[in-house]
Image (cartoon, rainbow, N blue to C red):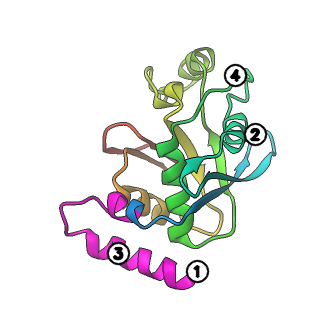
Amino acid sequence: MNNRRDFLKKSIILGAGLTVSPYELFALRMPVDRSIKLYNAHTGEHLKATYWSKDHFVIDELKKINHLLRDHRTGEVQNMDVKLLDLLYSIQLIRDTTKPIKVFSGYRSEKTNRKLREISEGVAKNSFHLKAQAIDINLPGTELKNLKKLATFLRRGGVGYYPRSGFMHIDTGPIRYWGG
């Protein structure tokens, strides 16, 4: 397994100068099974889920992930963008960690987003959280600035950096970067 990880890391680094994005190069070499470990900071729930096995998505595992990433304020569940799950998987694999990704916000309902906008100017009206295409995270054992560098390097969507709040936002929308 370490040889595969070393190969993947080197492929990503070498691929940085190619016309193929690092993520696309990485995706070509993804293992047969894709598992992610998550911890929901608001509900205390832990999950290890293999959402992709051999050549297909594992529906029951996706349902578990969607439940954990639900709007914890309303209980609403949405189907999370599988590209976002692949991004989380890539981050965990490259960081070579067994620690779960700590989740602060996954899917967000209109009602929750509206309430958060009332108390914070940093909440986007048309947030990708509303589309189940965004997640706010940190990874214990990894400095947030290094996590931001990795997400930026993978070029899979938006990356927001919030060091004072202790999390990073990633989404599968257009590539863009900001700090808060």
125 relative to 148, above or below: above
Image: magenta residue range: 1-26
Residue that badge 1 annotates: 1
Query: Cβ–Cβ below 8 Å for labels 1 and 2?
Result: no
Number of labelled discs? Answer: 4
Q: Please report the residue visible at 55 percent of the width from the left and 41 percent of the height from the top.
A: 135
Residue that badge 4 annotates: 76
At label 1, the amino acid type is Met
Residue 2 screen position, x and y as percent:
56, 83
**Outermost residue, bottom side:** 3
At label 3, the amino acid type is Ser
Query: Cβ–Cβ below 8 Å for labels 4 and 3?
Result: no
For residue 143, which quarter of the picture? Answer: bottom right
Work out whether mark 2 precedes mark 4 in sequence or the reverse, and give the earlier one.
2
Q: Could you say whether the residue bearing mark 4 is in a helix, strand or loop? A: loop
Gap in Å between the C-alphas at discs 1 and 2? 33 Å
Q: Could you say whether the residue bearing mark 2 is in a helix, strand or loop? A: loop
Work out whether mark 3 precedes mark 2 in sequence or the reverse, and give the earlier one.
3
Work out whether mark 4 precedes mark 1 in sequence or the reverse, and give the earlier one.
1
Q: In the rendering, which numbered label is found on residue 11?
A: 3
At label 2, the amino acid type is His
Residue 166 in view of the camera? no
Gap in Å between the C-alphas at discs 4 and 3? 39 Å
92 relative to 58, above or below: below
Residue 63 screen position, x and y as percent:
70, 36
Mark 2 or 4, closer to the camera:
4
Residue nearest the viewer, comparing 97 with 83: 83
Residue 102 screen position, x and y as percent:
67, 52
Work out whether mark 4 precedes mark 3 in sequence or the reverse, and give the earlier one.
3
